[in-house]
């Protein structure tokens, strides 16, 4: 199990994708290492026993950042939270 930190919600010029988050994984520094994580399960713990569950769907840039899509929309204060990536 790897640990990561949520950088923020994925967004474009005109809209936000509330179900998708950009996550920087500790120890992953390039896109080749991050490519092995595509399809892995991601879990965010939120205020006690509530958890948001999703999957890694793609890469974001060349620095090893991943895009995770969740089943339910994420709250606005999700930036900076810790995420668990389960291989």
Image (cartoon, grey):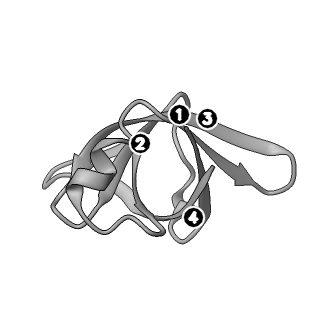
Q: Is residue 47 left or right of residue 74?
A: right
The label shown at residue 77 is 4
Residue at the disc numbered 2: 68
Q: Is residue 11 visible?
A: no
| In the depicted structure, whether residue 80 falls above or below residue 25 | below
Residue position for label 3: 53
The mark nearer the N terminus, 3 or 4, is 3
- Counting from the top left corner in percent of width and height, residue 68 is at 41, 42
Q: Residue at 45% across / 69% down in the picture?
A: 27
Q: Secondary structure at mark 1?
A: strand
Mark 4 crowdedness (10 Å alpha carbons): few <14, some 14-19, many ≥20: few
The one of 54 and 17 positioned closer to us in this rendering: 54
Are the residues tagged 4 and 2 within 8 Å (C-beta)?
no
In the rendered image, the vertical position of residue 20 relative to residue 3, given as above or below: above
Q: What whole-number distance in Å separates the C-alpha atoms at marks 2 and 1?
A: 6 Å
List the residue tagged with mark 1: 54
Q: Marks 3/1: CA distance?
A: 4 Å
């Amino acid at each position: 199990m790897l640990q990561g930190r949520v950088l923020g919600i994925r967004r474009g010029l005109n809209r936000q994708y509330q179900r998708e988050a950009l996550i920087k994984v500790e120890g992953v520094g390039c896109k080749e290492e991050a490519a092995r994580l595509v399809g892995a399960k991601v879990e965010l713990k939120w205020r006690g026993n509530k958890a948001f569950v999703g999957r890694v769907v793609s890469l974001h840039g060349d620095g090893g950042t991943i895009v995770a899509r969740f089943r339910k929309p994420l709250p606005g204060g999700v930036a900076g939270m810790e995420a668990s990536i389960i291989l």
